[in-house]
């Protein structure tokens, strides 16, 4: 299963979105001028196998995605299996999947996050038999085989900030936070001095498997990110993140977020320019009798 997935950094996935989805994505990032961090894209993974349009699998997938939106208005986590209970349905038409919102999200914010994820997953992974999409505040995954409850600690995404060298106090605090997070059984927030962090397991894991997954995530985080001032490690079924309070460097050695910012800024600028041009054309059209030119 892991071999069949292609995982995209923020840059690759955003560039894959259609222009129409960019409007939706940008509008979902702010409310009353304040950023909604729950909607920020982190990573996606897509299977190499593709299904045919109008196939039984597509029908079950659409039902699954609709169920996510409906269920997320009532609960932060749920899992589903579609099309596996009928002998008349082809075996490869079944859809197994789940969604999960971060443990500190309100139900309304969870629902909005899942709606955003559902709108994006088909654009990032078109016609894929399996896909996963991680936003800042929520996660969606589906496959055409039953993966629910089966432990998977494969690395999906990492991000490491600039290094903090020779700061003994910082690393002592960081290790205290990571040790506390490692004991989580679902979602946990922790802090020590100026270091903060949180960890989360997907809801289909039992407490023992959750602890095992988080221990693996902490080990990978220390190995891969070393002395970073902030770091994220996402495994298939859990993740661990920490940062220095008041500081979180978006630069990363695993994905080119600076390039993403420049790319997004260029796209926004182009779209804004098109909007201005449309307004000017409209004004000039009305003023043709006055020999308007531009």
Image: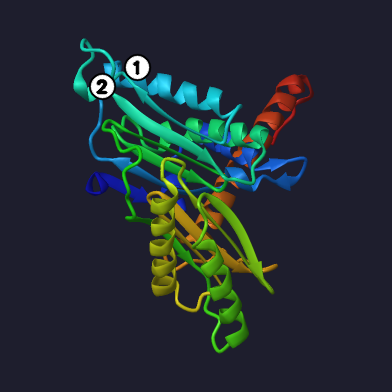
- Tally the numbered discs: 2
| Residue at disc 2, secondary structure | helix
- CB-based contact (under 8 Å), mark 1 and mark 2: yes
User: Residue 60 appears at what percent x and percent y?
Assistant: 35, 19
| Left or right position of 275 against 43 | right
Residue 259 sits above or below residue 74 on the image: below
Residue lying furthest front in this view?
A: 208
Residues packed near mark 1 inside 10 Å, few (<14), some (14 to 19) or many (20 plus) = some
User: Residue 100 appears at what percent x and percent y?
Assistant: 50, 39
Identify which residue, 202 or 11, lies in the foreground.
202
| Left or right position of 92 against 15 | left
Asked whether the viewer can see residue 271, the reply is: yes
Identify which residue, 223 or 161, lies in the foreground.
223
Residue 59: give its label.
1
**Residue wearing tag 2:** 93
Residue 274: give its label.
none
Identified at 54% across, 34% down, the residue is 114
User: Residue 293 appears at what percent x and percent y?
Assistant: 71, 33
| Left or right position of 217 against 89 | right
User: Residue 9 appears at what percent x and percent y?
Assistant: 42, 53
Identified at 23% across, 35% down, the residue is 49
């Amino acid at each position: 299963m892991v071999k069949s997935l292609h995982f995209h950094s923020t840059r690759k996935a955003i560039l894959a979105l259609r222009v129409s989805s960019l409007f939706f994505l940008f509008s979902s990032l702010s409310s009353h001028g304040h950023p909604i961090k729950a909607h920020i894209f982190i990573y996606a993974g897509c299977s190499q196998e593709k299904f045919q349009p109008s196939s039984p699998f597509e029908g079950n997938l659409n039902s699954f995605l609709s169920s996510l939106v409906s269920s997320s208005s009532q609960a932060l986590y749920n899992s589903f299996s579609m099309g596996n209970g009928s002998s008349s349905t082809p075996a490869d038409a079944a859809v197994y999947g789940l969604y999960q919102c971060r443990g500190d999200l309100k139900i309304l914010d969870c629902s909005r996050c899942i709606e955003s994820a559902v709108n994006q997953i088909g654009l990032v992974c078109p016609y894929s038999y399996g896909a996963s999409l991680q936003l800042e505040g929520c996660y969606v995954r589906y496959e055409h085989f039953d993966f629910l409850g089966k432990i998977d600690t494969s690395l999906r995404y990492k991000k490491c900030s600039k290094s903090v060298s020779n700061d003994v106090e910082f690393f002592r605090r960081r290790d205290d936070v990571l040790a506390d997070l490692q004991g989580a059984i679902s979602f946990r927030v922790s802090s020590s001095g100026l270091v903060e962090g949180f960890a989360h397991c997907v809801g289909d894991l039992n407490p023992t498997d959750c602890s095992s997954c988080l221990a693996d995530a902490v080990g990978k985080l220390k190995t891969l990110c070393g002395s970073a001032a902030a770091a994220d490690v996402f495994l298939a079924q859990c993740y661990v993140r920490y940062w220095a309070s008041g500081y979180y460097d978006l630069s990363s050695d695993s994905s080119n977020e600076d390039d993403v910012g420049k790319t997004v800024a260029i796209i926004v600028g182009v779209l804004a320019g098109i909007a201005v041009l449309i307004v000017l054309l409209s004004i000039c059209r009305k003023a043709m009798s006055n020999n308007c030119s531009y």
